[in-house]
């Protein structure tokens, strides 16, 4: 049996020649899915994030923890896990890494003698301040096709899914 030629599509396959020179696939069903669209947008944002945060040595979760601590000094590990929807064992190693980098420190919690509050060190405060400015700019760059109003609407709609 001869192999099919490029000009003769197999049964059930679209005729590539009739599609013109476009390599675009029919993604109509995928493009109606929230998850697919959120993931595609996230790929753009995460690429910007990785590039712009590399000089700071921060991954997305590192930045999130540091930002939360900048705005919530003394937060506990439990509070961070709840806010970021991560498991405690995953946070333990992250906190240890940030501590070893001299970005955070543990202090006794003022209201719960069994808990430790997490605080930024001066180095952590400086780093997160610079990183937050860079993230605001990278988000603006990644969403440059949106107006400020559209961006706000998008954020509110996404939050309706997970809040």
Image (spheres, rainbow, N blue to C red):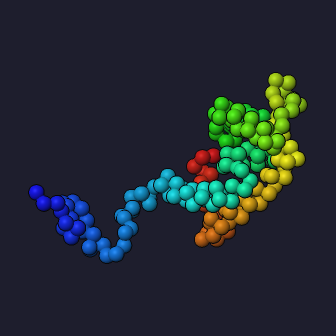
Which of 5/105 is in front? Answer: 5
Which quarter of the picture shows residue 113? top right
Please determine whether, in this image, residue 121 is positioned above or below residue 34: above
Which quarter of the picture shows residue 14? bottom left
Which quarter of the picture shows residue 97? top right
Please determine whether, in this image, residue 52 is positioned above or below residue 89: below
Residue name at image x 65 percent, y 59 percent: 51
Residue 93 x, y percent position in the rendering: 69, 34
Question: Given the current orientation, which residue lies at the most extreme top position?
Answer: 114
Please determine whether, in this image, residue 9 is positioned above or below residue 132: below
Quadrant where the N terminus sits is bottom left
Q: Please indicate, yes or no, whether residue 5 appears anywhere in the rendered image.
A: yes
Q: Please indicate, yes or no, whether residue 152 appears anywhere in the rendered image.
A: no
Horizontal side of 59 relative to 125 (left or right) equals: left
Horizontal side of 88 relative to 122 (left or right) equals: left
Residue name at image x 21 percent, y 70 percent: 7
Please determine whether, in this image, residue 93 is positioned above or below residue 60: above
Residue 110 x, y percent position in the rendering: 89, 31
Residue name at image x 82 percent, y 47 percent: 124
Horizontal side of 7 relative to 71 (left or right) equals: left
């Amino acid at each position: 049996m001869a192999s099919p030629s490029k000009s003769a599509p197999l049964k059930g396959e679209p005729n590539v020649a009739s599609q013109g020179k476009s390599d675009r696939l029919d993604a109509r069903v995928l493009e109606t899915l929230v998850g697919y669209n959120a993931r595609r947008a996230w790929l753009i944002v995460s690429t910007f994030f990785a590039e712009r945060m590399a000089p700071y040595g921060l991954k997305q979760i590192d930045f999130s923890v540091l930002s939360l601590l900048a705005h919530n000094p003394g937060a506990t590990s439990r509070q961070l896990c709840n806010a970021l929807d991560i498991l405690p064992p995953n946070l333990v190693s992250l906190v240890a890494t940030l501590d070893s980098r001299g970005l955070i420190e543990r202090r006794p919690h003022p209201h719960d003698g069994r808990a430790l509050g997490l605080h930024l060190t001066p180095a952590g405060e400086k780093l997160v301040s610079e990183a937050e400015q860079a993230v605001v700019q990278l988000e603006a760059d990644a969403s440059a096709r949106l107006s400020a109003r559209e961006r706000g609407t998008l954020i509110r709609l996404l939050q309706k899914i997970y809040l």
